[in-house]
Amino acid sequence: MTVENSLRTTPSANNSATTANQPASSPALLFDTINAYQKTATIKAGIELDVFTAMAGVPATVAAIATHCHASPRGIRILCDYLTVLGFLTKSGGQYALTPDSALFLNRKSPAYAGGTLEFLLSNEIKGAFDHFTGAVRKGGTAQSQDGTVAPEHPVWVSFARSMGPLMVPAAAGLADLIPLDQNRPTKVLDISASHGMWGNAFAAKNPKAKIVALDWAPVLEIARENARAAGVADRFRAIAGNAFEVEFGSDYDVVLVPNFLHHFNASDCVRFLKKAHAALRPGGTVAIVEFVPNPDRITPPAAAGFSLIMLATTPEGDVYTFAEYSDMLAQAGFTPPTVHSLPASMNVAVVARK
Amino acid sequence: MTVENSLRTTPSANNSATTANQPASSPALLFDTINAYQKTATIKAGIELDVFTAMAGVPATVAAIATHCHASPRGIRILCDYLTVLGFLTKSGGQYALTPDSALFLNRKSPAYAGGTLEFLLSNEIKGAFDHFTGAVRKGGTAQSQDGTVAPEHPVWVSFARSMGPLMVPAAAGLADLIPLDQNRPTKVLDISASHGMWGNAFAAKNPKAKIVALDWAPVLEIARENARAAGVADRFRAIAGNAFEVEFGSDYDVVLVPNFLHHFNASDCVRFLKKAHAALRPGGTVAIVEFVPNPDRITPPAAAGFSLIMLATTPEGDVYTFAEYSDMLAQAGFTPPTVHSLPASMNVAVVARK
């Protein structure tokens, strides 16, 4: 008799605490949420021990995985069972195998390997900020430090640039597809908070006459420059170091890319920034905001709506904005009414408008 | 145009990275799992700031909740939106309201209030052990300290007894219903790792001639004694302080209760303990093991299967055991084949056998 079977046949006397037509109350969601940090620890251990590569291509037993990972069979068995519960592995006949997404993102030999994102996502600047989260709710902004991650030259953005780039490649290619440039003349793309440079690189790759101007803090730009070199577009790459609200952009850009930048600021600073972007564009030029954009209810879709939490924990005034809010900001800055577009393999969307 | 609408009408050119009949690959599960610790921080902040009591009985605006909680409206808005995403609140017309489960478990004025469980569940001994989780997988047991939470007189069990009792009340009543005692003669119930004493109290409440013998570490027993007094059964309550593997139990018990105890130990120690319980029972007496019991696949149901993770992180050798494994242990200890029963409002089941 399995527990599942017996639970189905347990006499209803056990359920005397609930009335006939009401769903039984349960603390399951509460405990699952209080214990959610254990899921973080589980995926972190799986990545750190490289369990996913241990079964790349072929299902593996506990013993084989333990050998690959230099870990105890008992620890590996419990870890892999829970990775299966979470949906990263499948289990059959005593062997574990990768799901298609795990094969793509968690096998260290995959070009789309995303295990490196732990460096940024679980950094003290991000994860550590949530140790002060109750204080952030009280205060209405980060309680970890005065300026959080928007402090000048904050080193977390080096970590972001180093670890988050590969994941942006499909979305960046999608965005470049979405905004075709004139192939008959030299064009210019300004990449704000360029970071790893993947957004600009995608435009350079698709448009042989396009020059990319990447803006970010100086140490971050070194990573963007390396990536431009690796992509074979270094001869069309130029950098502007400094604060995007303060430095000179130059002028006559065909496109200003604004990927995952505006959510760090309040709405009036966003408008101030968009006016500056507007001034830097040639007539008819395009601004492309890449962002987490929740629906007007601000509770769907979950990933976009939930991103506001990270902004509350890590910045003084950052937030997610709805499409209506971005439309309003863009109108105030002089742009045409925007359109919104999904991006491949991304929880971000592109909000696109013209000068 | 909402994002939702526009996403439905985005040209399929954006999805060129995926082929027609394959589900699109997505890092959503990976990011959601890496960021899962943020859910812990969210429910912790909600409980610490008492947002749930702020809307007890009547839906409330951000402003009203912020006033009740002495917190910023901006922080409360972002917190309550995410508590809605997580399923603890509902949101309608700019007001937030409690779900039935939140009204039961999270309103501070509810008799089933479970916010106090944070003291144990997020204690350094439990949550802190997951800071060393990769090490625990390598080693095959807790990497936080030598003996983890099974060290003699470990203070975390005082915290457990103080905070987890109220949640056990429905399950304890269900267990007492399941094991009727002879009402015509004095009976004796031994409550192993009695903790808050709720399991024993339920038997005392249902059986006026039953005497309860609670076994735990001495400081924990003070809490059990208080709770027996509060339940009006102090005159039938007796305590045995010490290690359950070492101290004398006495004899002729009608029932030995073993709630959430065996998962801390390896299988052969469990058998050793069950033999001792067997010896303490009168002929025909009952042992009732209350436990997380996964199906033979060890990956379902999630809460029971996942509990092995906590044992890996916090104990040297603890684990969850299947019904077949408990049946085998009980047979080795001389018991009849067991039956398994669900318990109200609990993720535990009862495995019940006779001498």
Image: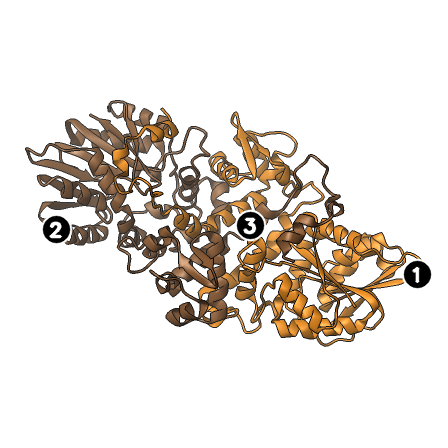
Chain colours: A brown, B orange
Q: For this rendering, which residue is in front, B168 or A147? A: B168
- Residue B136: percent from left, percent from top: 48, 68
Amino acid carrying label 1: it is Arg
Amino acid carrying label 3: it is Asp
Disc 1: which chain? B
Instruction: Give the class, few, some or many, for how many residues have Cα within 10 Å of label 3's Cα (few <14, many ≥20).
Output: some
Q: Secondary structure at mark 2?
A: loop
For residue B37, above or below residue B81 = below
Instruction: Give the class, few, some or many, for how many residues have Cα within 10 Å of label 1's Cα (few <14, many ≥20).
Output: few
The residue wearing badge 3 is A32
- Residue A36: percent from left, percent from top: 51, 51
Q: Determine if marks 3 and 1 fall on one subunit.
A: no
Task: Write the residue at 33% across / 58% down.
Answer: A107
Q: Does residue A85 appear in this view?
A: yes
- Image check: A298 left or right of B187? left
Q: For this rendering, which residue is in front, A225 or A115? A: A115
Disc 2: which chain? A
Nearer to us: label 1 or label 2: 1
The residue wearing badge 1 is B185
- Image check: A266 left or right of A12? left
- Residue A12: percent from left, percent from top: 73, 45
Identify the mark at residue A232; answer none if there is no mark.
Answer: 2
Q: Secondary structure at mark 1?
A: loop
